[in-house]
Structures are given as structure tokens and as C-alpha cells.
Image (spheres, helix red, strand yellow):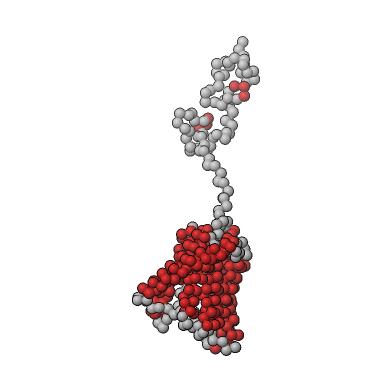
Amino acid sequence: MTRPPDSSLPAGSGPPPDGMAAQADEPVGPGGLAAPNEPAAPSDELAAPGEPAPPGEPAPPGGRTRPAVSSPPIPPPVDQPPTRLGVGTFTIEGRQAPALFVVGWLASIAGLALVFVGALGGGTPAVVVLLIGLALLSVGLVAGAGSQAIERRARGMAAYWGPSPFLVFAAVIPLTVLLQALAGLPLVAFGLDPASPLASLVGLLVTAVVYLGLVRLVVVGPGALSWPEMGVRWPGRLGVVDLVYGAAIGVPLVFVSGLVALMLSQLLAVPESPLPEAGGPIGALLNVASAAVIAPIAEEVFFRGYATTAWLRSIGANPAIVRGALFTAAVHILTVGGASFGEGAERALFAFLVRLPVALALGWVFVRRGSLVAAIGLHAAYNGVPVLALLLSGR
């Protein structure tokens, strides 16, 4: 008696009768028995038709093909580093101090416009417009310097994140002109000659206050550089040594610059002395104070203590010395003029080339000694020796 077809045979009871074995291309159900009349269950390994199975591998039941490998999910976008936002980038998006940035640009543009209008006009109203323009331009450039420092600090500039010396010097110009004009009005009202040694001394004092004040405001105040980091030392025994060291180098530089000036005078027009006529011993002493005391201190704090130190940290010693020297020599030709454009250009070139050797020496002494006092001593000797020589000669 034969066993009727029964799909409930227990597993391991032997092979099924003939005709009951599962086909090779049929899916096998639980217990190893074939399920010929059941459709193949959907599988994650099977995909839509049109993609053939790999070579050497049988096609799945029903003629369906294997799926293509799906691409991995796209990861979420990674935050990009912040875009560099300099003072010349016209946007407030992403600014750390957007209000300061806007004030800087608006005040600078308005100030430049008023300065232009006031310079072209005449009379008291034009002078008032000019002074207002200078004030606005000063505020705008100082605000721009502060905005630049905040942006640099936010970007994590570790070596030096303070404002650019070029931008800070741009703020020095209108602020100095404004304050000199305001300080000179009472002197003129009392009959003082604007070209006298006393007026020159007052003008240099104003310039020194602007130099030191801006460095304190936008560099030392925010913490970009400290006074000791700029080589400022309290006067003491070491300060005296540095002062003498710088002066000892400055004296022979006077003769070197004299030889350079003598050779250049054969080719170029010679500019006038920046100091006024002494007119007597008192005037000569005032000129000595201006040239050998006030100017060296103010200029060395700005051009060596601040500018050269900033560049020393960002671009290295030798490039910082060269850049500081070029900057110093270029600044000293801003007030050089002439009867014609050609004469003014020759005088400016003369003044630039004569000052370049001493400017390089100032940077070298400052970096080598790490002392601002040494640079001040060199500068004082270089400026003071010719003035003292004129004083002693009675001229």
C-alpha cells in the first residue's frame, strides 16, 4: 500500500517517494520539503527586472534578476570653514561686529565726500565742512580697524590678529590733521607764526598723541599686542645701555646718509628741511626737542614697536624689517612738495632714498636688541646730530 501524498512528513523520515522530490529550481519550504505551488517570497536580494545576475550564478526563481548594489546614503553637508571677511568685503553676513563694520564704511565714505567738498570750497563754511569731514573719516577708519581686529581674532589668527598697520596709519592722517588744526587755531589767534619752531613742536606733540593713542586704543586695548611685546621697557640700567647702543650706531649713519644725499643731489631736486628756521637759540632748542625727542619716540612706537612687531610675527624677521623700512621712508615723503609735479616727484624720491638706509638700520637694531629704546636712541642721534651741529655753529 502506497503512502498518499502528504506534505506533513516529518523531517528526517527519509526521502520522499518518486515524484515528490523538490526540483532544483524550486524554493524549499520549512523542513526541507519543496513547495512547488507557492510563489517565491519577496527577498531583499532580488530587484526589479533588467539587471542580470553575476556570471556563473543561477538566476533566481521566476526569472527575476539580482538587484544592483544601492549607493550609500549621502551624508549631511559638513560645515565649511568661515569665509574670510576683510574690511573690503561688503557684507554684514557672518560678521562678528556688523555695527562696527557698517559705521566704519559709512563714516569713511561720508567723511571723504565732505573733505573733498571742503577742500574745493572757500571761506569759513568750507573750513567747517572740511573739519567735519576729517572727523567723520577719522571715526570711520578707526571703526574699520576695530572691525578688522575682531574678525581676525574670530578666525583664530594666533600670531597676530590685530588691525593692519597700514589701516591704522590711514586713520592717523585725518585725525592728526584735524587735531593740529584745532590746536593751531588758538595759537594763530594769539599771533603765533604757524611756521615757527613752537608751532612745529605743538604739531609734533599732537602727532605723537595720535600715534600713541591709536596704538593704545586698537592694538594694546583689545590685547593684540602688549607694550612689553612691542619692546617698551621701563627706563633703567638696561634701558640706558640700549639707548647708548642705538645712539652709537646712529652717529655714523648721519655721515652715511650725508654721502648718499650728496650723490643724489647731483641727480635730483633737494627737498626743504622739515624743521622751521630756528631764528635764535630758543628756536634751535625747540627744534632739537622736536627732532631728537618727540619725533623719535612717537615714530618708533608706531613703526617699530607696533608695525614691525606685527609683521615680525606674521611674515618673519627679514621681511618685517624691509617692510617696516619701506613704510617709514614712504610716510616721510607725504608732505614733500614742489613748484611743479616734476620737482615734487624728484624731491619725494630724494627724501625716500636718503631715509631708506637709516630705516633699515632702525628695524635691524629693534629686532636684534628686542628693545624699542635702542631704536629710539638711534633715531634720536640721527635726527639730533645735524640740528645740534647747526646750533653749535650759530646758524
Which residue is depicted at the point 57% across and 46% down?
75
Look at the picture and state if 273 lies above or below 313.
below
Q: Nearer the viewer, residue 390 or 370?
A: 390
Q: Nearer the viewer, residue 348 or 66?
A: 348
Q: How many marks?
A: 0
Whether residue 65 is visible here, answered yes or no, is yes
Q: Residue at x 53, y 37 (%)?
A: 47
Q: Extreme top residue here? A: 1
Relative depth, front residue between 1 and 336: 336
Q: Residue at x 46, y 75 (%)?
A: 386
Which quadrant holds the N terminus? top right
Could you say which is closer to the camera, residue 137 or residue 227? 227
Tell me where residue 132 appears, x and y as whole percent.
58, 80
Q: Residue 84, how many percent across, how many down?
A: 54, 59
- x, y (%) of residue 137? 56, 75
Who's the residue at 53% across and 66% down the image? 243
Q: Position of residue 270 (x, y in %)?
A: 40, 78
**Rendered position, 342 above or below 22:** below
Occupied quadrant, residue 172: bottom right
**Residue 195 can be seen, yes or no:** no
Q: Quadrant of residue 8?
A: top right
